[in-house]
Image (cartoon, helix red, strand yellow):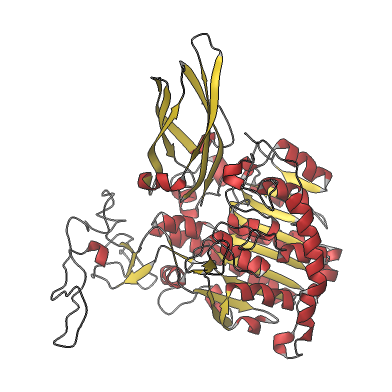
């Protein structure tokens, strides 16, 4: 995961690259009221370290509602199709809570 | 992916609109009579308890002063209430439960708008804000919050966005949309460039960048800490002296730390270096008033106790009460200045109620804790359906003891939180069933209740009785001497 303005507000669990997809679980642990906006930048690379592709994954805040606890968002699953991926990087350019 | 847009649609259009409205809209107020209601004032301090409903005030009073006591805000002589409804996007159809964005736009710009809108009307057109107009009229201006300073309540006085999530540092179409078909600067970048607020104190340092800092310094701001880097400290704030100062101090990368947490869980050096809302309010008033410009034209200051709402969303009663009391301390600071200055109007209110906070009878239980709702059959007179010939009883699986006491280990516990009040005997502590104050939440969301209003100072009579949140803009604009 790349450092950014919101790195201290999230915890990434169980990140994996498998079968052409990047999967992870995300906790939002700071400012733990309603989630208003969340976007993830995922870039993936082949075995030689060459960039294969990238995408901006926009989360619908309503999809996070089921994972909302008094401690914040817990265990929110994210899956991003990443054909040919062996490794990947994750950045969070947008995170807004109520 | 869109990066940082250099388009100045929001800033330039707003400034032009603010000037235009100053000539036309505010002029209508000059037709007011010369009674006490028509009296103008030099300074206005508007304090917003975000999410603060009547029960929030009641509960905080009970804890600190007891049943017969009164918070500082309750001691202000003028009392009223405010309706808070918003509208659906693109229409005037009421949306009965507002969010902070549309509510703040209502009192900042005098228009009903859709939830999430910042300084735009229901059709997405930019509307001038009272702070922009005050600045254009020569007043000093300040904006203080315990939230990120890009959050809805402070932002609605000094920025414009189709969606409140457009806070920065990055512009994306998903989080920002467009205004009038064009991308525009995220809220943080607008704040850094538009010079609307002279004194800016709060959180959200991570939403700004070194470029923003350079621009603000070039515009004469003293930047405490480093924007986008090291957060500011209370000591740095106290060290600012001199007249006619423009200052930005952001004391956390995100929201400021709730007061209860400062004492309990996170006594790190960084947390200890955060000022309280009262301290920020006192500093802002001092910085704004120590100015030849301010003595001539006055100042407009908005102060927000933001964490009342955020902790209510989390159904944390202890933190909710703590933040309400911290907000009341800020009210005390504002009143102290106003009493000495005698030309300052203080207004205390809220944007909406949050979470259906309520006081229940000691030993009673709520519907959420019950096996069924109450009985609704009374002899032969009831026609309700479904018929409930008998009421529910306490469900031991849904209520496992005070949620801040014996039931604190159960995450699915719906039991109330109990708090000692100032009237309780020694030995009674929070979480005891013997404590007098039993507090519950309806949900984790806003409600449509009217909210309380308290006011003090010249022209405060304008705010007695029931107002709509858009009326607050009209009344503040009419009260300000510089806008007449």
Q: In the rendered view, does B43 fall on the left or right side of B174?
A: right
Q: Residue at x 23, y 70 (%)?
A: B363
Nearer-the-camera pick, B414 or B27: B27
**Residue B253, visible in the rendered structure:** no
Total numbered badges shown on the rendered structure: 0
Nearer-the-camera pick, B466 or B326: B466
Which x, y percent locates residue A61? 46, 46
Which x, y percent locates residue B266? 47, 43
Which x, y percent locates residue B342? 73, 78
Quadrant of the rendered image containing residue B399: bottom left
Q: Residue at x 59, y 58 (%)?
A: B117
Examine the rendered structure and indicate whether residue B170 appears above or below residue B385.
Answer: above
Q: Residue furthest top?
A: A48
Q: Residue at x 37, y 44 (%)?
A: A67
Which x, y percent locates residue B72? 55, 73
**Residue B245, visible in the rendered structure:** yes
Examine the rendered structure and indicate whether residue B283 appears above or below residue B456.
Answer: above
Q: In the rendered view, does A11 fall on the left or right side of B202?
A: left
Q: In the rendered view, does B478 fall on the left or right side of B61?
A: right
């Amino acid at each position: 995961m790349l450092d950014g303005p919101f790195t201290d507000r999230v915890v990434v669990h169980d990140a994996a690259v498998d079968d052409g997809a990047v999967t992870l679980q995300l906790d939002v642990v700071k400012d733990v009221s309603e989630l208003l906006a969340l976007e993830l930048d995922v870039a993936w690379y082949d075995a030689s370290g060459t960039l294969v592709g990238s995408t901006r994954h926009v989360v619908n805040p309503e999809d996070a509602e089921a994972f909302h606890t008094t401690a914040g968002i817990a265990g929110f699953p994210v899956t991003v199709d990443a054909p040919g991926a062996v490794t990947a990087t994750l950045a969070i350019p947008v995170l807004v809570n109520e | 992916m869109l990066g940082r847009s250099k388009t100045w649609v929001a800033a330039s259009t707003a400034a032009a609109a603010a000037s235009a409205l100053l000539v036309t809209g505010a002029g209508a107020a000059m037709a007011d009579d010369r009674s006490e209601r028509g009296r103008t004032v030099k300074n206005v301090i508007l304090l917003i308890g975000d999410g603060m409903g009547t029960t929030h005030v009641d509960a905080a009073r009970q804890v600190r002063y007891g049943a017969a006591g009164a918070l500082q805000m309750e001691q202000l002589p003028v009392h009223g209430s405010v309706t808070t409804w918003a509208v659906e996007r693109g229409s005037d159809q009421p949306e009965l439960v507002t969010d902070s964005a549309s509510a703040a736009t209502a009192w900042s710009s005098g228009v009903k708008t859709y939830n999430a809108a910042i300084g735009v009307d229901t059709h997405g057109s930019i509307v001038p804000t009272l702070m922009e107009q005050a600045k254009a009229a020569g007043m000093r201006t300040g904006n203080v919050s315990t939230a990120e300073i890009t959050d809805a309540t402070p932002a609605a006085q000094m920025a414009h966005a189709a969606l409140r999530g457009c806070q920065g540092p990055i512009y994306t179409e998903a989080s920002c949309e467009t205004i009038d078909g064009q991308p525009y600067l995220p809220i943080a970048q607008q704040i850094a460039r538009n010079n609307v607020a002279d004194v800016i104190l709060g959180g959200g340092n991570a939403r700004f960048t070194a470029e923003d800092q350079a621009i603000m310094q070039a515009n004469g701001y003293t930047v405490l800490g480093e924007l986008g880097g090291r957060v500011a400290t209370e000591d740095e704030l106290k060290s600012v002296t001199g007249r006619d100062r423009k200052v930005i101090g952001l004391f956390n990368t995100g929201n400021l730390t709730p007061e209860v947490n400062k004492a309990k869980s996170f006594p790190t050096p960084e947390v200890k270096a955060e000022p309280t809302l009262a301290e920020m309010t006192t500093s802002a008033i001092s910085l704004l008033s120590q100015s030849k410009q301010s003595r001539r034209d006055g100042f407009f200051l908005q102060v927000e106790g933001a964490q009342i709402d955020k902790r209510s969303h989390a159904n944390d009663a202890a933190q909710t009460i703590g933040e309400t009391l911290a907000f009341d301390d800020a009210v005390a600071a504002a009143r102290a200045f106003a009493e000495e200055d005698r030309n300052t109007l203080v207004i205390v209110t809220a944007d909406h109620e949050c979470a259906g906070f309520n006081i229940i009878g000691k030993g009673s239980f709520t519907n959420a804790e019950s096996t069924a709702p109450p009985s609704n059959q009374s002899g032969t007179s009831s026609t309700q359906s479904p018929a409930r010939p008998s009421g529910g009883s306490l469900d031991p699986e849904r209520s496992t003891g005070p949620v801040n006491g014996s039931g604190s280990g159960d995450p699915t516990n719906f039991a109330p939180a109990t708090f000692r009040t100032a009237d309780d005997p020694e030995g009674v502590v929070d979480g005891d069933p013997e404590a007098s104050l039993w507090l519950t939440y309806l949900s984790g969301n806003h409600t449509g209740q009217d909210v309380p209003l308290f006011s003090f100072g010249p022209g405060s009579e304008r705010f007695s009785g029931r107002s709509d949140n858009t009326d607050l803009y009209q009344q503040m604009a009419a009260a300000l001497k510089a806008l007449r």
